[in-house]
Amino acid sequence: MLYTGNKVYNIRINKFGIVVNLRNDSREKKMREQDPSHYYYHIDYEDGSFDTYVSVNSLIECDRQKNYPNIQTQTEFPAYHNYKQGQKFVNTCTNKTGTIMYLRDDEYEKNQRKSNPTHYYYHVDYDDGSFETYEYGGYLKPI
């Protein structure tokens, strides 16, 4: 889930922006009762445009700064669906290094990838002793 003020990158239209708010009216709440992954946001983009109904599946939370300074197209993201157990990486949002423990690959994850081919999440252990059980592959760069 994203929050107001989060910096995001829309992988569908290749733009950076900021979350204005979660679409949270009664219709959206009812949709989330049927589909817990149904999160849509109002996004203001850096180029001055906006979109009032963007799926969370189209967004990557990340600072523009040095993390993805030259993104032009979605194809410039690493092939993060190919990461293997034991592979080392650096998280481009936090600059922390770590190790892939395993791909989250249950039925829910497989179904999500049918509609969003970039939906790859991993259990990772960081070198500083912390861990994340649901880390987005798009944040990870192999080292």
Image (cartoon, grey):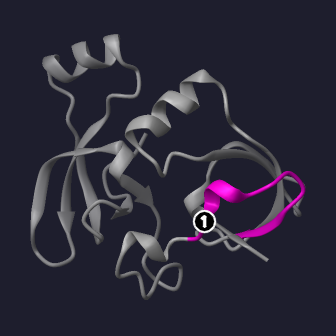
> What's the amino acid at mark 1?
Ala
Along the line of sight, the residue nearer the viewer: 113 or 25: 113
Specify the segment rendered in magenta: 78-90
Number of labels in the image equals: 1
Q: Which residue is mark 1?
A: 79
Q: Residue at the location (74% across, 58% down)? A: 83
Residue occupying image coordinates x 10% and y 75%:
48
Q: Is residue 65 above or below residue 112?
A: below
In this orientation, which residue lies closer to the viewer: 125 or 100? 100
**For the residue carrying disc 1, how many other residues have a C-alpha within 10 Å: few (<14), some (14-19), or many (20+)?**
some
Residue 84: say if magenta: yes
Q: Nearer the viewer, residue 57 or 66?
A: 57
43 left or right, relative to 74: left
Q: Is 46 on the left or on the right of 120, as rendered?
A: left
Residue at image position (48%, 52%) is 118
Q: Quadrant of residue 129?
A: bottom right
- x and y, in percent, of residue 72 in the image: 35, 82
Q: Position of residue 97 (x, y in %)?
A: 80, 69
Residue 143 percent coordinates (x, y): 79, 77
Image: 51 above or below 23 = below
Q: Is residue 62 above or below residue 2?
A: below
Pick whichever, 85 or 17, lies toward us: 85
Q: What residue sits 33% from the left and 11% below the top?
A: 33
Q: Is residue 100 magenta?
A: no
SS for tag 1? loop
What is the quadrant of the N terminus in the image?
top left
Picture quadrant of residue 126: bottom right
